[in-house]
Image: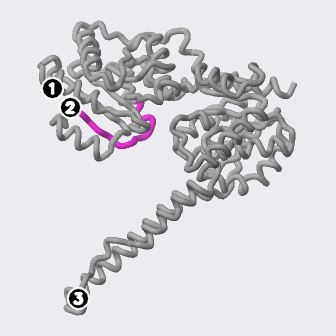
Amino acid sequence: MKRALMICYYFPPCTRVGALRSEKFVKYLGRFGWHCEILSAYRGRAKEYEGKEDVKIHHTIRIDLDDMISKLVSVSRIVCTFIRRQVRRLKHKGCAGGNTSTQSNPVVVRGLGIGLHIQRWLLLPDRQAAWILLALPKAFWLSRKCDVIYSSLSPFSAHVLGLIVKKLTGKPWVADYRDEWSLNSEWNPPTRLHKWLGEKLDKACVKNADKVIYVTQAGTERFFGHFGGCREKFVTIPNGYDEKDITKFRGFDPPKDVFVMTSIGSFYGGRDVVPFLRATDQLVKDGIIEREKLNIQLIGGRNPDLVREVERLEIGDVVQIMPRIPQQEAFMALALSNVAVLIGSDMERMAMTTKVYEYAGMGKPILALVPEGPVRDFVTKCGGWCVYGTDEEGILETIRDIFERYKSGRLEIYHQPAFIKRYERCTLTQQLANCFDSRIK
């Protein structure tokens, strides 16, 4: 079989969203004649994947400054708690006096400050930069028996490692940009020098890659317009859904006496659920929706600010805010819902969140609070509703319309349109395999 070196910093058992895309590619590449040699910063288990005889997982030690600082803080808290308890015990016996406060820990505070400075000023292109040196010997050794090199961003360091291996071996290299690097408006280097170096590295990666993959067509066109070069180099392979993950959750009937709206995922990057909550609260106060007939589930979005807002609006009996739960449980909650809610932000002007494919694959009516962009285009083709996330009045009117359809029995689960099938993970993996094949002929 043909062999591909898959440079994926994030890979299961890592649970970050970024690990999902690479995991699904690995799961199905064997069907198209490709053996995967995975190089990751996380120790994986090949037996968890289909065609495990076609998968080998190699890992290297990772040095993550954030993890180190977090551990320092945890140890410091344990030590401080122990000292505080001992001081209190001695004071209770009359053997201690004076100021016994140990709440502040200048060592930890200083360590946090130093760590942040190191991360921003010395680690280029990102805080995983040390992994490049740790992984390079193994990456070079593995690449010698592979036909194609593949790297998945983020972190940026994965592409820099792919670039170095490409230069050392001359093997074909496919660079998968799950996220933008220098083109990302949220990329904020500390100095002009860091910005210049980052842009140079990003340009070098695009220039030297044999194929550059992005997850939306608009993003692919932006890459081509900015970096130039051969148009055929730039390919769009979107995220998608795995039929095997969701097929068993289709066909469930939501409760007849409660209107259930469910959102899955955390709220970050400007994703604000408050306008949605205020709109639904107003509908309840206006008597459009009876309080006892409404249930809103926010799965994976629990945070103190959101809890306080729900308490302030006095809708705790309507809104369930849940921590992150296993995928199968989240899908079951979605299967028993009337509407799947997608809370977006300005990131969705270019980005395409993975959960929207899973919503559509399960055949759920979708309410997407997103701006103009690929998510809105996709949801519109699925027959869903789209409104800008800060348009509270628009959100209110849209939910009113959806609820009226629900009451009159016109809120039907749409059947999978033909176009959604092209977003099935196996189909997308075939596109990646075609990219690999085209570079070794």
Query: Spatial distance from mark 1 to mark 3, Cα to Cα?
Result: 57 Å
Residue that label 3 marks:
97
Question: Which residue is found at the position 39% from the left and 42% from the top?
Answer: 324
- The residue sitting at 38% across, 13% down in the picture is 413
Looking at the image, can residue 46 be seen?
A: no
Q: What is the x, y in percent for residue 37?
A: 74, 42
**Disc 2 vs disc 1: Cβ atoms closer than 8 Å?**
yes
Q: Amino acid at mark 3?
A: Gly
Closer to the camera, 149 or 189?
Answer: 189
Residue annotated with mark 2: 318
Q: Earlier in the sequence, mark 3 or mark 2?
A: 3
Reply above or below: 91 against 81.
Answer: below
Q: Which mark is residue 291?
A: 1
* Quarter containing the C terminus: top right
Label 1 is placed on what type of residue?
Answer: Arg
| Quadrant in the rendering for residue 430 | top right
Position of residue 424 measured from the top left corner of the image (x, y, whole percent): 58, 21
Residues packed near mark 1 inside 10 Å, few (<14), some (14 to 19) or many (20 plus)? some
Q: Earlier in the sequence, mark 2 or mark 1?
A: 1
Which badge, 1 or 3, comes first in the chain's sequence?
3
| Residue visible at 29% across and 20% down in the picture | 395
Q: Residues within 10 Å of mark 3 (few under 14, many from 20)?
A: few
Left or right placement of residue 116 versus residue 238 in this view: left
The local crowd at label 2, few if under 14, some if 14 to 19, many if 20 or more residues have their Cα within 10 Å, is many
Residue situated in front as seen by the camera: 215 or 251: 215
Q: Residue 51, position in %: x, y?
A: 69, 35
Q: Which residues are magenta?
A: 317-331
Q: How many marks can you see?
A: 3
| 243 is within the stretch colored magenta | no
